[in-house]
Image (spheres, grey):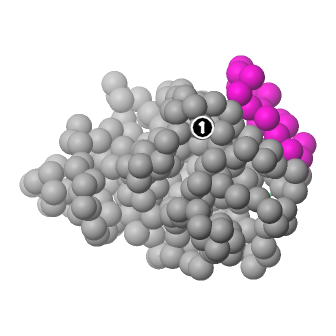
Amino acid sequence: MSSIPDSNVRYHCMVIGNPIAHSKSPDLHQAFAKQTGITLSYQRQYCPNDVDSFTAVIEAFFAGGGTGANVTVPFKEMAFSLCQQRGELSEYARLAGAVNTLAIKAGKLYGDNTDGRGLVADLLSQGVRLKDANVAILGAGGATRGAILPLLDAQVKSLHIANRTVEKAENLTRLFDTDKLTFSSLTDLPNDIEVIINATSIGLSGDTLPFAKDMTVDFAYDMMYGKPSAFLEFFKAKHAKTSDGLGMLVNQGALSFALWTGKQVDLTNFHF
Ligand code: ATR
């Protein structure tokens, strides 16, 4: 942990992960700080991948006056458990089973998850109609789990979860008390999907998704960014509108920033 920052710096934040060198969060939050006129220290925090190290780093950070932390791979579930044991969780974090934002609320550790709301905010800001839409999400890991409540909040007509391991998709539908959720394998998607979201880690493996060749949608969104996406190319070739996940990163960050500072960032024409 770096030394205590200048006394005139009011907000002390960090992103904790492993690896962490590539994280864009410090640049993002400094851009938010500049726009909202606050002074912020925001560091990248590497941590060994074990619970004891993670707990020790988080405790030291908040004991030293830390305002808030973003939590990234592979610590989101550990952060969830820590808040479950000694703090509080937002409804989004509870249903996501993961925490991407830590703060102190009424003297206690508080865990939120802004990823799914960041996704929905980005989709809406790009003019995507979610209300009454048939939406499909690919994958049944943490990224999908965190997106379900925000997509339901956006009043989708149906939300279909498709996954290579069908049982995992089925298990996710059981966590939510709604008949809007359905599930299938990746090759068995309904044919009335309007918005499709890739929340698998497939881009990292170099594999491609085994879609039916005649599948069409209005809008395709890949949660990944910064890499070519075979998923987006597939739908672009069919004249769908597409987007990578950079806006999700920006929006989830803006929600964390608001939790820590009380400041709302204006994301119109925002670049960082
Ligand atoms: P995250 O927390 O980012 O969601 P995860 O929990 O590891 O990551 O989930 C990764 C998702 O990508 C899973 O749904 C996984 O499918 P399985 O549940 O069948 O493992 C999906 N995935 C990863 N590689 C894939 C591939 N090559 N083809 C299809 N799905 C893949």
99 or 266: nearer the eye? Answer: 266
Instruction: Tell me the quadrant of the picture where the C terminus can be found.
Output: bottom left
Could you tell me which residue is drawn at 20 percent across and 56 percent down? Answer: 33
Q: In x, y percent, where is residue 103? A: 38, 39
Q: Decide if residue 59 is in sight here.
A: no
3 or 229: nearer the eye? Answer: 229
Could you tell me which residue is drawn at 80 percent across and 45 percent down? Answer: 190
Could you tell me which residue is drawn at 58 percent across and 62 percent down? Answer: 240
Q: In x, y percent, where is residue 20? A: 50, 70
Could you tell me which residue is drawn at 79 percent across and 28 percent down? Answer: 174
Element class at badge 1 = loop
Q: In x, y percent, where is residue 37? A: 10, 54
Within the image, what quadrant is residue 15 found in? bottom left
Which residue occupies the extreme top position in the image?
A: 177
Tell me: residue 129, above or below residue 95.
below
Q: Decide if residue 35 is in sight here.
A: yes
Relative horizontal placement of residue 264, taking residue 87 as reference (left or right): left
Q: In x, y percent, where is residue 7? A: 12, 54
Relative horizontal placement of residue 178, taking residue 100 as reference (left or right): right
Q: Amino acid at mark 1?
A: Ala
Instruction: Tell me the quadrant of the picture where the N terminus can be found.
Output: bottom left
Question: How many neighbours does mark 1 have within 10 angstroms: few (below 14), some (14-19), or many (20 or more)?
Answer: some
The stretch drawn in magenta includes residue 87:
no
Residue named by callout 1:
133
Q: Which residues are magenta?
A: 166-185
Tell me: residue 179, above or below residue 156.
above
